[in-house]
Image: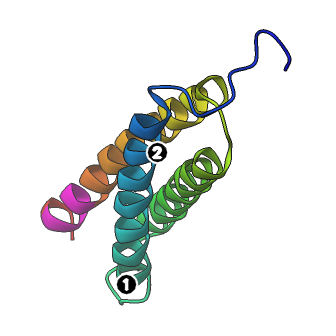
Amino acid sequence: MHGSQPEGPTPHEANYNMVAAALATAAATMLTLLTTLGTTSLVGNPTLKVLLETQLLVIEVALIFSVVSLVRRGQEAKRPLVLASAVLVVVGTLLLWVSATMIIFFP
């Protein structure tokens, strides 16, 4: 025994796993949507192309952080990864909103 090291998972570790799985699902869904949008002819505007690439990068990093947090053990390791993933999913959602607004109002 190592004194300060708990033997089993911490009480909140399951909660972080659940949030990380939900974030990974949201990020994967957004990646599918963005990939579909990127393959259409709607993205002829260079500004929209840059915005789409930025969205893809942000959401991919969020997905990576979510999956890494699921693999890591311990609440202290999971918390910053889940928080970073959540922030990136929110930023990706806002970027997606901006690009959708641009497509609708500035064709």
Q: Residues within 10 Å of mark 2 (few under 14, many from 20)?
A: many
Residue position marked by numbered label 2 in the rendering:
17
Q: Residue at x 36, y 89 (%)?
A: 40
Relative side of 15 to 101, left or right? right
Q: Residue at x 40, y 51 (%)?
A: 23
Residue 85: % across, % down: 50, 41
Q: How many marks?
A: 2
Residue position marked by numbered label 1 in the rendering:
36
Three-letter code for the amino acid on which mark 2 is drawn: Asn
Q: Which residues are magenta?
A: 100-104
Q: Relative to 90, does residue 42 appear above or below in the rendering?
A: below
Q: Quadrant of residue 1?
A: top right
Residue 86: % across, % down: 42, 38
Which mark sits nearer the N-terminus, 2 or 1?
2
Q: Residue at x 38, y 47 (%)?
A: 18
User: In the image as oriented, which residue stretches furthest toward the top?
Assistant: 3
Residue 98: % across, % down: 28, 50
The answer to whether any part of residue 43 appears in the image is no
Three-letter code for the amino acid on which mark 1 is drawn: Thr
Q: Residue at x 68, y 44 (%)?
A: 72
Relative side of 106 to 72, left or right? left
Nearer to the camera, 42 or 61? 61
